[in-house]
Amino acid sequence: MATFDDPDGQLVRLDAPTEADYEKEVTVEIDGRKVTVKQAEPLRGAEGNVILDLEGRTTPRHTTVFDAAVRAYEEYRRDCASEKGRPTAEPPGPSAAQAPGAPGWREFPIPVLCHQPHMKPVAVCRLCVVHVYGPAGGRWVPERRLTPACQRQVKDGMRIFTSKAPGPEGDPVRKAVRVLIEMLAHEHLKPAPAPAPAAELAPFNELKQVADRCLLDGSRFDFDVMEVPPPARPRSNLDASSPVFLVDHSACILCDRCARACDEIKAYHIIGRSGKGPTTRIGFDLDVPMAESGCVQCGECMVSCPTTAITFKPVATVKPATGARTVELLTAAELIVDPMLAGVPPKFLLWQEGLVVRRRLKAGEILCRQGEPGNSAFLIKSGRLGMIAWPEDALASGVGGLRRWFKKPPEPLGRFQVGPADVIVGEMACVSGNPRSGDLVAVEDGEVWELRRNVLDRILRSPAQRARFEGIYRKRALDAVLQSAEVFQGLPPDEFGRCVEFLRPRLSFVRVSPGQVFFKQGDPADSMCLVRLGHVRVAISQFGREVTVLFSGPGTVIGEMGLMAIPAAEALKSVDEIDRVLSNALLGSGAADLSSAIPTGRRSATCSALDHLEMARIGRADFLEMLRAFGSVRRRLIQLSVDRLRGDLQFASEASLGEARREYVAQGLYQGQSLLVLDLTRCTRCDLCTRACVDQHGSETHGVPLTRLVREGLRFGDYLVATACRSCKDAYCMIGCPVDAIHRGRHKQIVIENHCIGCGLCARNCPYGNIFMVPNELQPRDVPDPDRPGRTLRVAQPKAATCDLCDAAGRIDRPVPRCVYVCPHDAAFRMTGEQLLEKVTGMAAQKVKG
């Protein structure tokens, strides 16, 4: 019993679970079937991942009756599948319901509306109630009240009866559940309001599904009575202010799934409850219409809603970006029956119709080419596909067209085939937004489903599918990092192949969050990393102060100097001299363990992630074995280390160069693949670049003239980095678009598609302010007039706009942006971050020498 000064404010307090409870087992009996579960489980997020605190520890939660029922049902289905002569999908006959330990569950025995496994249980719908029996006086006695399964923690020896329990033990539960469903259905079971697709949404109404489950064909209740007291200001039950969603408060059962989705999954904290008693309903911000709130139109609330309280307007129509005969649009009805999409909410698939298409392939047909924007992935349904990876220099010179008649075609880096057993291909480019890493060609006639990133993200939120895809992704990510790593560039194909075969089983896949430190200066060197995605901040400190800040991007090697124990004093030695010392030490050691052949080095810098980082890691012992087995790789690593050491000495001795590097990283210029740079020593501020941008794009996309650049920004050396899209390598703007209307174009530029709904999420995600939200006069919409009920206003919904290098459709090989072309003083340039850094540091070095 807790006292009144209990910080929880409770008279009776349950003991909080601990991590030790993970190992304690509890056996309970549900409808006559015994099941054993752990006393506690770690708290998990919406994607099924275990949530860790700042110290890396899990948060235990009590195992509930609902969790135990899920485990019991899974075991029951496995038992059904293992029975000889009985199909997997068909449960045992009615006679099995009477057998001890084998209830006749033809469906999950506990109905739910408010509960979701990935959300915090609130037990407001009460449909999941069960009757718990406990021992008392030498017999089993039922508890006085029914209890919600989603919150009731399990106790050893507990007997539980659900609405599916045969006999008198299940009668109280069946009666209670039926009355609750009858009351909810009478008041809130309604078709979706227009213009939502009511007929398509009807089969996915969860309230209707549980009503059908209880065989309800009417209601004994009548709630058509006047409210007492009547509200002082009647409020409309329908909120149609949003350009994307409809909110029908009369269909809301106050299950709080929308609010928990907004809080726990998306962390926007927009939805809550407003009002009291019979006037209680969900509200947005301070109970304002949805369109006037801070809602970003992500759709998580609509997908989570079990009724027709939140539905969508069919405004974001997606058109496949191809006119090929082999492309067919897949409907939600076709998608929901596919096992791969079983964990995706049907309402999401209905809302996102058009983001999955079927491609019927003929042998020899090219699905995609290396270097093209990877905006989709492919589920392999039948047939086999061949993958061919080419060297980067082969892409630059061309591997097809007329060139193949005049020069010998290059040798590919690798060839392999994939089929239905491999499930998916192209997922790495789709998730990361990077270009394709190889050609994809149909080896035989077949069929693939092409799906966009939104759908792939939803599939990966299913724990079962996520585990399956994670293994595929990690394996292919390791292969991709070997293909792109700078240390292997220029190796003969045969030696590269042998090196890959050596490293593949020895590499581990590592993900690092932004800001996380993974190497600390002065620590013993125990591994080397190959960067696949993201950027690394490399900071060198002297006397407690950072003196040099560098960065490394995809394809670079991190940590090799410490493993080879090359000190800064050897920066002036030749590569041959250092290689001779290392090779003698490695080859002269006859022991299988090479750990003592070279002394353990120390980290020369502190390395942390600037953004989301993916790397391949190799341990020290395997690294030394690689050095001994592959001389070309060893020399290449020595060359990289010597070059970096000499560069570090140069930046340390010349303060201006070090400051330029530090500013380069601070401004995020390392992300830029197409910076609009103005030379301030030449620019006369004539603003022709801005006017040319307006003239080029005109009113084609928004119905009004607009510019995609602003001649303002941060200075870097003698250059101004203008406010225009940088085509970032790791584009934050592409993350989370609710309708997948933003993607990369042919030239790695960011392209906004016409089905943009104007939520503004991309503009908020852009850290440089390079996306503008402009009213789209081409597609005005009717919204309710707040001052004149029953009437509508015609307004222009915002739509995102950003620089697309004057070639959104990708029709030309080398885009020439008008802002650069029209500059009369040759002061405007498009360049990468590395090119800009080279110019600025080069000018700084000349000033130092001069």
Image: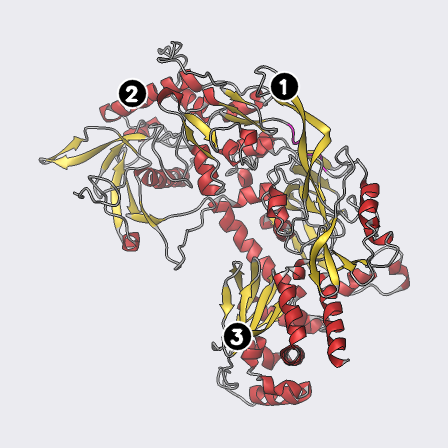
Q: Is residue 255 left or right of residue 22?
A: right
Which of discs 1 and 2 lies nearer the camera? The answer is 1
Looking at the image, can residue 187 be seen? yes
Q: CA distance from mark 3 to mark 1?
A: 63 Å
What residue type is disc 3 on? Arg
- In the rendered image of this protein, does residue 261 appear above or below residue 522? above
Q: Position of residue 474 (x, y in %)?
A: 55, 58
Residue 545: assigned label: 3
Q: Position of residue 469 (x, y in %)?
A: 54, 50
Along the viewing direction, whichever of 675 and 458 lies nearer the viewer: 675
| Quadrant in the picture for the N terminus | top left
Q: Position of residue 184 (x, y in %)?
A: 39, 20
Magenta span includes 280: no
Identify the residue position indicated by label 1 in the image. 792
Look at the image and give the residue range highlighted in magenta.
315-320
Q: CA distance from mark 1 to mark 2?
A: 46 Å
Identify the residue position indicated by label 2 in the image. 175
Q: Secondary structure at mark 2?
A: helix
What residue type is disc 2 on? Lys
- In the rendered image of this protein, does residue 679 appear above or below residue 524? above
Q: Is residue 464 left or right of residue 644?
A: left
Residue 471: assigned label: none
Q: Residue at x 64, y 46 (%)?
A: 377
